[in-house]
Amino acid sequence: MSEYHDPSNVVNPEHADHHIVTPVTYGIVFATLLVFTGITVAAAYVNLGILNPIVALAIACTKAVIVILFFMHVKYQSKLVKLTVTAGFFTFLVLITMTLTDYMSRAWGLW
Amino acid sequence: MSATHTIVNLPDQRTATMPKRTYINNEDGLLSWLLTGDHKRIAILYLISITFFFFIGGAFAGLIRLELLTPQPDLMASDTYNKFFSMHGIVMIFLFLVPSVPATLGNFLIPIMIGTKDLAFPKINLLSWYLYWVGGLFTLTALVLGGVDTGWTFTTPLSTHYLNTHVVTAATGVFIIGFSSIFTGLNFIVTIHRMRAPGMTWFRMPLFCWSNYAASILMVLGTPVLAITLVLVALERLVGIGVFDPNKGGDPLLFQHLFWFYSHPAVYIMILPGMGVISEVISTFSRKRVFGYTAVAFSSVAIALFGFFVWAHHMFIMGVSNYSALVFSLLTMLVAVPSAIKIFNWAFTLQKGSITFETPMLYAFGFLGLFTIGGMTGVFLGALGMDIHLTETYFIVAHFHFVMVGGMLMAFLAGIHFWWPKMTGRMYPESLSKLAAVTTFIGFNLTFLPQFILGYLGMPRRYHAYPPEFQVLNVLSTAGATVLGFGYMLPLLYLAWSLKYGAIAGNNPWQATGLEWQIQSPPLTENFIETPIMDHEAYDYEWLEHKTAHEVTTVG
Amino acid sequence: MDNAIVATHPHTHETAVPAEHEHVALPQHRHHFETQEQQREAGTFGMWLFLLTEIMFFGGLFFAYLLYRNWYNPAFVAASNQLSIPMGTANTAILISSGFFMALGVWAAEVRKKKLLVIFLVLTTVLGLAFLGVKYFEYKEKWELHHIPGASFDVSQFINPHAYGLKEEPLAPDMAQKTQVFFFLYFAMTGMHALHMIIGIVLLFWLTWRANRGEFSAGYVAPIENFGLYWHFVDIVWIFLFPLLYLINRHPVS
């Protein structure tokens, strides 16, 4: 590595070549998002019991992932950016799960 | 120390001259400072600002200790006392400790250490300084209008329901300072990832960069949670939204969870950069590569990561679930591991090194001892049973002052002395600064060791009066605080003096190996005349010896 | 872009540098970045780090929602059913369309089509404003129904829904009070989201003005691209808010 002067980070695994996403891709993504919006509204009217919020969240997550991958170009970005996005959601999950350990077990052993 | 053991001899400073063009005299006028994009000038601006706030916070500390000299409330009423310790906490934590090393030394050194011209986003760096001042002014406004008495924790429902003080103003201040700290952290992460000089691989970076990188991750991921928490507190005060109000169905413990989700990692935001300073100082004055470089580097990241999993140990007596408390207690012990890795590695760095006792090294030794005590008592407090006895007593006050003041402030002063020649081009007076280092160490121990005993005996924190049997120890503590105050005034005076009258330092007065020591001091605005190429490991003293042997002396 | 690896030794370094700069340097290229590619990637990475802070900022609110929804589920169901699904769905579609045009705007900037870029940015702005307009009517309806938390908050609709022509199950008075928690969170979350929209629209005006001057049609697209990231992030927040706030148990009569 020290042999090379590499200002553009080409040999750096954190680098990704720039990629221009075409309007066709954007169009397909847009249509998919609208379809999923329809599905999530429809699913809310069906009684699935405990599955209702799960389905709603699963659809929301799918939509979010699609937006992140295509509208926000993460699919075409370097591993560094992918890792960064993952780290954000990971920390959010830490916040949720570790706090829930308290709320879920608070009543244990009290009855 | 005989010459056979010292690999590198210190250069003769009598022959050193000041460079003609430096970042300080490159442009003139106040505006050239206030609108600068230069990371070194912003670092100096930050240094002046945090020193200002440090002495404001210190004044409150002095008044608190003065009140506690006697058991009776004779100097101030209870609510005044509450305001004093709250303002002491808010100013010291948010306006001094969090930005101390990253925003001053980090801003100044990280770009130079990794061999680039500036941070990735110079304008955002300047914006961060302005946000710091806006936040600082809000805090000062709250202070002038009559202060806040929530404690630095803004605990609900105290802060939302029972106080008529300027909680919202102070919270706004902290909210804005949070953004300043986010921008600093963001800048460091991008710079370290994207701007390293050719050959500067991750494992050739100085450990100072590693620890600032770890702290930056915490700043970016933790601070926004504090921001939303303070927004909710402000909304609860202003419009009565009841997310934390049990009367309306809210849960006050949710506030605690969200608050400590930031504020525990914030402890590592404060201490990690200090640990980076210590790595640099100990390596330089032992003339040895840091023992277990990789382990020390990864332990910084490990501390940052574990830091997000332990926050509920601040809440053991607040009614969290016992099972959850058990988990958090065990996880808390886990943080001791990377901290101990650092301490042991520094100890092994010292082993068989050619140790010299310059001022930064004295401060670093102070750090090692005091941080170890602070850290070990932290393990005490992390143990569930002990915590119930010790929490909310002076034991905890002593614990976090050992870590924050004994650890962080010692590291900050070590760093300021160590890099002072680089920042200003002049040396501080050596004997006076050694006196200051020793005074600080003695004063500190006299102030806070008695508080461990007081806490263990059961003296609660945050009260302005106490039973008479605690007076002896409190008098000791106040006496120590006086010594400590002198210890902190001294550097302010002689460092200011040295700006004009200090001996000219030369490029590398310590014969240290970092890239920052291979350029002129004070540096040029663009740091390097040509992009440096890193072809050796960090802390490679043989490389330095080889280099100095072959270079024509330009110092004279 | 300039992707060549230039072999460099300390002595050949000076001669190697000009080879990297054979293209014309853009005026927006900052001196401390060696190449524009480096500057661009630094910008994107920085923007993503900023979005991480946004994730955690909204994360606190989402956790509060998760907690209270579990504690006060009946109240959340009843209160959620007072929100208008047509308006919510319409707003979701509006916002997704706005994001779509923003994405097209990024594309237009990259292929250097100035007119298209301005058109797409204007469309993005208009749809963003439409979203806020719909939101205004939703808030106004809540005001009229006394569903704004505070002194005038009225739970009678939840205690005795049949009197208001609703098919909901009546709630016990103490549970009915907890609908207020839902509305706290509704207003805090949608309000914080709307605040981000407003900031975004202000930035859009500024970007449109700059785009109209042709600043982004010569290969320098970083502001458009990074603003796009912000705008899409605001979309994502709404993508979660919509099912969580509007679509809880929409099948009350079973």
Image (cartoon, grey):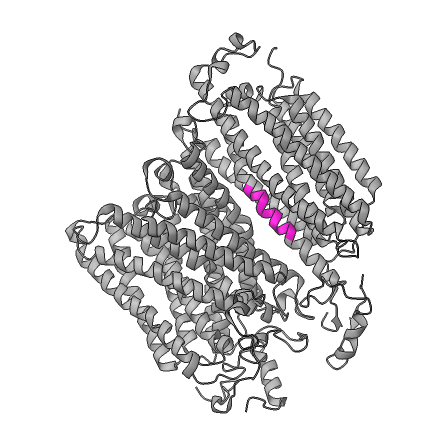
Residue B461 shows in the view: no
Quarter holding the C terminus of chain C is top right
Residue A104 versus residue B206: which sits nearer the camera? B206
Residue at left 52%, top 34%? C188
Q: Quadrant of residue A59?
A: top right
A86 sits left or right of B46 in the view: right
Residue C143 versus residue C111: which sits nearer the camera? C143
Highlighted range, magenta:
C47-57
Residue B415 shows in the view: yes
Residue at left 59%, top 25%? C138
Report x, y in % for residue C61: 53, 36
Label total for image: 0
Q: Quadrant of residue B409?
A: bottom left
**Is residue C50 within the magenta segment?**
yes
**Is residue B509 within the magenta segment?**
no
Residue C92 in the image: above or below residue B460? above
Residue A78 in the image: above or below residue B20? above
Report x, y in % for residue B521: 54, 79
Report x, y in % for residue B269: 48, 56
B86 sits left or right of B298 in the view: left
Quarter holding the N terminus of chain C is bottom right
Report x, y in % for residue B145: 33, 49
Residue at left 79%, top 74%? C18
Q: Quadrant of residue C174?
A: top left
C184 sits left or right of A10 in the view: left
Residue C5 versus residue B291: which sits nearer the camera? C5
Q: Main secondary structure of the magenta part?
A: helix
